[in-house]
Image (tube, helix red, strand yellow):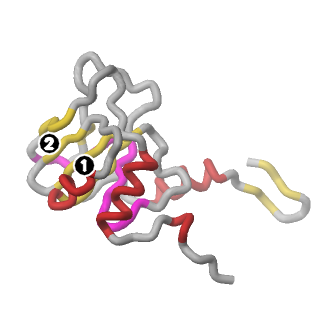
Amino acid sequence: MSVGLGSGPVLSLDRLVRLGRELRPAVPVGRPRRLAVPDGMTAPLGCDAVAVPAEFGPLVLARLPRVGCVYADDAHWWWIVPSDSDYALQWPSPTQYAAGAVVPDGPPPDLIHRPEGTLPYTPPIPLYLALCRVTGTTPGWSRPISA
């Protein structure tokens, strides 16, 4: 943290994102657990997960040019994305962003898609745009700014 000229502490955008994470619950109700990266895959950028209601899963999947690991249970489909993929992005409702790929307790989601290669990631920007499309949400950078 640095101090501006007479204006008090100045927080970086990175610090603000981390503070925001600390203020909101990491996962929905239940005992949390992490989605496991399949054997033979590595996650050099760390792992977070983005969940959508199960009825949106096939619609999102069809709109993605590249798909990483996808897990599914009766209620949600979970996409593995690199850590901090929520940095400066407000994921559209009703999606859930799970830092650390921590999901609520319950029956473990099944791995329904495994990409070729060793990286488990779905690229976050195409996933964000696909989610905006299926939820009817305007991407954050396209919204008008009000004064």
Q: Residue at x 61, y 48 (%)?
A: 14
Q: Residue at x 18, y 53 (%)?
A: 58
**Mark 2, residue position:** 109
- Residue 35, percent from left and from top: 25, 36
Vertical comparison of 68 with 29: above or below: above
Vertical comparison of 134 with 103: above or below: below
Relative side of 115 to 73, left or right:
right
Tell me which amino acid carries mark 1: Leu
Label 1 packing within 10 angstroms: few (<14), some (14-19), many (20+) = some
Q: Which mark is residue 52?
A: none
Q: Say if residue 62 shows up in the picture.
A: yes
57 in the magenta segment? no
Relative side of 83 to 131, left or right:
right
Q: Which mark is residue 61?
A: 1
N-terminal of the two: label 1 or label 2? 1
- Residue 123, percent from left and from top: 41, 41
In magenta, the rendered stretch is 91-106
- Residue 59, percent from left and from top: 22, 57
State the SS at label 1: helix
Tell me which amino acid carries mark 2: Pro
Q: Residue at x 51, y 66 (%)?
A: 140
Relative side of 17 to 95, left or right:
right
Relative side of 88 to 94, left or right:
right
The image quadrant that residue 32 belongs to is: top left
